[in-house]
Amino acid sequence: MMHWLEPIQLKGALVTLDPLDINHIDPLKTAVMDGELWKLWFANVPSPAQIGNYVAKAIENARNGDIAFAVRLNDANRIVGTTRFYNVDEKNRRPMLGYTWYAKSACKTGVNTESKLLLLQHVFEQKKAIAVEFRTHFFNQASRTAIERLGAKQDGILRNHQVMRDGSVRDTVVYSILQHEWPSVKNNLTSRLSFHKHGNESAVAEITPAS
């Protein structure tokens, strides 16, 4: 069955986004241990022991039109994180973009900026998306800052939206980028990437757990 979004490799100057597969399990275990992000109570980042199931579930969800990627550094040929389009509304050409996390060593390096540029450029320019949605925990300030720096605008807050693994109930902040906003967002990301290459930008790492 063909879906609106299909697995594709997206290559930039700093990173390449490879369709996620079982060969990425061990590299992602190494990546997630760099910073131990699964210990953050407000983020749904898997522990090393959970990576296998995490990848298997992502591959299974691809049958329903989701696309997950491993983020690979071009110069070191090293996997430093993962991201995906999920809960894809094919009829309305509106995917969610999230499940994003990176190794601590990939923070403030331009990895997130270029990854988002590649993903958004593909979905808006090649797939003619109407909108792209982002969701994150109300208390995940790093994620909220990173999403806002992309140029996404807040749509609202879903109160008592999701039960977290520790039993707490999160409020989910919803953001989106609309089709007509993409040219400005693209200019913003391209400019930030250029500044980063010249050492003038301090990037913010993004952790965007599932909604």
Image: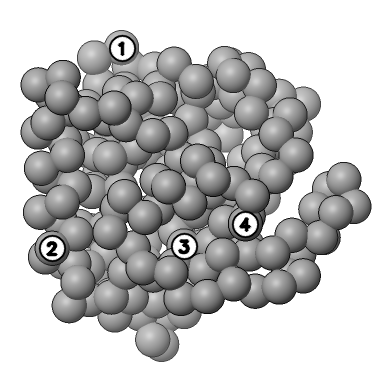
Q: Which secondary structure, mark 3?
A: strand
Q: In this view of the protein, can residue 4 be seen by the observer? A: no
Q: In this view of the protein, can residue 47 be seen by the observer? A: yes
Q: Position of residue 38 (x, y in %)?
A: 70, 31
* Mark closest to the chain's N terminus, 1 or 4: 1
Q: Residue 124's quadrant in the figure? A: bottom left
* Mark closest to the chain's N terminus, 1 or 2: 1
Q: Nearer the viewer, residue 186 or 122?
A: 186
User: What separation in Å lies between label 1 and label 2 (alpha carbons)?
Assistant: 31 Å
Do the residues under discs 3 and 1 have CB atoms within 8 angstroms? no
Disc 2 marks which residue?
184
Residue drawn at (24%, 39%) of the image: 114
Q: Position of residue 20 (x, y in %)?
A: 48, 41
Do the residues under discs 1 and 2 have CB atoms within 8 angstroms? no
Q: What's the amino acid at mark 4? A: Phe
User: What separation in Å lies between label 1 and label 4 (alpha carbons)?
Assistant: 34 Å
Disc 1 marks which residue?
76
Would you say 16 lies left or right of 58 here?
left
Residue drawn at (75%, 33%) of the image: 50
User: What separation in Å lies between label 3 and label 2 (alpha carbons)?
Assistant: 18 Å
Would you say 159 lies left or right of 60 here?
right
Which part of the image, by quadrant, shows the C terminus? bottom right
Disc 4 marks which residue?
138
The residue furthest top is 76
Disc 3 marks which residue?
134
Q: Which secondary structure, mark 4?
A: loop
Residue drawn at (28%, 40%) of the image: 113
Q: Position of residue 192 (x, y in %)?
A: 17, 39
